[in-house]
Image (cartoon, grey):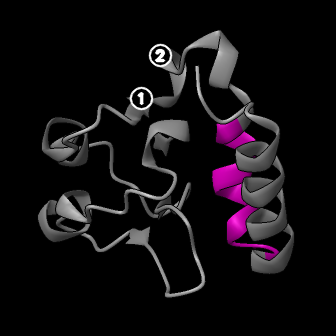
Amino acid sequence: MTFVITNACIDVKDASCVEVCPVDCIYQEDDDRMCFVHPTDCIDCAACESACPVGAIFADRNVPKEVSHFTALNALYFKDKTAARAEVDRLASSGQSVT
């Protein structure tokens, strides 16, 4: 299992989750509008979930249905950052990033 960062993180990037992650599996770069959890490096400790001030982080089995596409988006980031960033931009501009 892994944790997933969802829509509430877009344009917030508080990074409290990054600071508490014991295995440094949460990433954000200057070009990113949100943080992303590496799906295979996450050790399922849940430290990030409680550290998130906007409630954007869920265990993958608990991601709300309306934002379930963020599970694939987090994984995509580690295969193709450009495509993941474009999808975040698309979701944000279409209003689909907000539940």
Q: What amino acid is found at the position of numbered circle 1 in the picture?
A: Ala
Q: Which residues are magenta?
A: 70-80
Circle 1 sits in a helix, a strand or a loop, which is it? strand
Q: Looking at the image, which is closer to me, 81 or 89?
A: 89
Circle 2 sits in a helix, a strand or a loop, which is it? helix
Rendered location of residue 91, percent (x, y): 77, 44
The residue located at (36%, 63%) in the rendering is 13
Rendered location of residue 46, percent (x, y): 23, 39
Please check the rendered image and state whether residue 89 is part of the magenta-colored stretch, yes or no: no
Is residue 73 placed above or below 18 in the rendered structure? above
Rendered location of residue 25, percent (x, y): 39, 68
Q: Residues within 10 Å of mark 1 (few under 14, many from 20)?
A: some
- Horizontal placement of 77 versus 33: left or right? right
Q: What amino acid is found at the position of numbered circle 2 in the picture?
A: Asn
State the image quarter where residue 84 is shown: bottom right
Is residue 87 placed above or below 41 in the rendered structure? above
Q: Main secondary structure of the magenta part?
A: helix
Q: Residue furthest bottom?
A: 30
Q: Count every numbered label the image shows and give the total.
A: 2
| Residue 51 visible in the snapshot | yes
Distance Cα–Cα, label 2 vs label 1: 5 Å
Q: Looking at the image, which is closer to me, 49 or 92?
A: 92
- Return the residue at label 1: 59
Please check the rendered image and state whether residue 78 is part of the magenta-colored stretch, yes or no: yes
The residue located at (19%, 41%) in the rendering is 53
Q: Looking at the image, which is closer to me, 80 or 9?
A: 9
The residue located at (39%, 36%) in the rendering is 56
Q: Residues within 10 Å of mark 2 (few under 14, many from 20)?
A: few
Return the mark for residue 62: 2
- Horizontal placement of 29 versus 74: left or right? left
